[in-house]
Structures are given as structure tokens and as C-alpha cells.
Amino acid sequence: KQEVTQIPAALSVPEGENLVLNCSFTDSAIYNLQWFRQDPGKGLTSLLLIQSSQREQTSGRLNASLDKSSGRSTLYIAASQPGDSATYLCAPEGGDYKLSFGAGTTVTVRA
Amino acid sequence: GAVVSQHPSWVICKSGTSVKIECRSLDFQATTMFWYRQFPKQSLMLMATSNEGSKATYEQGVEKDKFLINHASLTLSTLTVTSAHPEDSSFYICSVPTGYTTMGGYTFGSGTRLTVV
């Protein structure tokens, strides 16, 4: 059973700082790894998908890296803004096309 | 992009009653939908895979007679929590696989907050 750990559980930074969110998973036999954003009481918004054969994926201020063999992924958010405040979820997708979620990192960006 | 509509967004019900949650794929035909449950400060846990025209597949530990899933069309899946108890209070979210892009592979509903009193 895939176990996903996200560190830190919470993070508070002043606006403009870069954010580093870490994710580790126990089963390296993944199809891809996805990062999501969840606002309080809301559903999930897709951010990035990294295929198992890729090392990183970028979209705007977001960059995600993947080291499949060591079971790690990192999400970098550059020049953080108050609108980036949310919970960020990491979810490796197994060969059975099922997502396993971490508990998330709750980010607060202070204006 | 694909749009998934989930209703209701919140519901309060009395213990022992049943509650139905709808998940609609507005612009995408979905042969498969997923139902998750999320307790406060915890991760999303997959409950079941809803299959259009056939029985749902439940994850280990999820009572199929308590959480009834119906996927009668390519655009609608429903989750009915039967004989609800306070411990069923949770946030329920559905998702639809919508094809892989650099952003992701699933579109999620906005979730339903269920409170059983």
C-alpha cells in the first residue's frame, strides 16, 4: 500500500519568498505523480503532473521535481503571493490508475 | 477544461437517515468516476471506483451496503450514505479522469460537507 508523507505540515512565509514543499512515497512503481491545490472546504485543482520517466515539470512560477527511485518529489513555488495560500497535496498514481494522497502542506503567505 | 459539478455542497442530516450526493460530469463522458472521503487535517482516502453500467469497486474497509454507488449514465454518479451516523460526518469528493496533460489527469468536484447530528 502506497504511503505518502508531506513535510512540512504547515508553512508560513512573507510575500515574495520562495516555497519548497516536500513529498515522499514508499512505492516507487508509479505511473506519474500529481500535485494539487486545495482551498478550504473546496475540491482540488490540478497544478502539475510529472510522468514517471520525467525528472521535472514546470508551469509558470511552479516547478516540480521527481526522483522516482528514492521516492521523492518537491514542489517549488517562486516569488510567493498571498493568493498562493492553500493546502498543497502530492499524489503518486499507481499502475492501477489510483491516486494516493498525502495529508498536505498548508501554506500561508503573509502580505 | 472539463467541469465536474457536485451537489449538495453541504448537508446536515439526522442520525439514521440517508443522504444522496451527486457528481455530474458536465462536458465529458465518464465511464469511471472516483469517490473520496476526507477527514479534517487528513489526506483524501479513496472509497470506491464508480463504473458506468456496472457495479462499483470498493476499497478495502469500505462498507458497500452503507455507501451505495450508482453510475447509471456517462455523466452522473451518485453516492448514497445509508443509515448515516455521526462518524460518517466528513468531506466527500468525486473525481473524473479527463485525460493526462502537464497539469494533471483528473477533474474534481467541489466536495460535499456531510454533518450527521
Image (cartoon, rainbow, N blue to C red):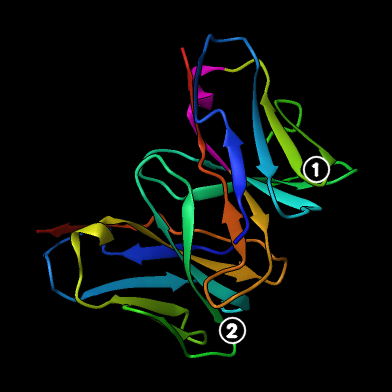
Identify which residue is drawn at 61% across, 51% down: B3
Q: Which mark is residue A52?
A: 2
Pick whichever, A108 or B76, lies toward us.
B76
In the rendered structure, which segment of residues is drawn in magenta? B85-93
How far apart marks 1 and 2 lie (CA) works out to 28 Å
SS at circle 1: loop
**Residue in the picture at 68% in, 68% down:** B99
Residue type indicated by callout 1:
Ala
Look at label 2 and name its amino acid: Ser
Q: Position of residue A70 (x, y in %)?
A: 46, 84
Q: Residue B12: image x %, image y %?
A: 48, 16
Helix, strand or loop under label 2? loop
Task: Work out which residue is located at the far right of the displayed protein and give it.
Answer: B53
The residue closer to the viewer here, B94 or A59, is: A59
Residue A93 among those drawn in magenta: no
| Whether labels 1 and 2 share one chain | no
Residue B77 is situated, as x and y percent measured from the top left of the image, at 74, 39
Above or below residue B91? Residue A102 is below
Q: Nearer the viewer, residue B61 or B107?
A: B107
How many residues crowd around disc 2 within 10 Å: few (fewer than 14), some, or many (20 or more)?
A: some
Q: Nearer the viewer, residue B1 or B83?
A: B1
Identify the residue position indicated by label 1 in the image: B56
Q: Quadrant of the N terminus of chain A?
A: bottom right
Up the image or down, A20 lies above or below A10; here it is: below
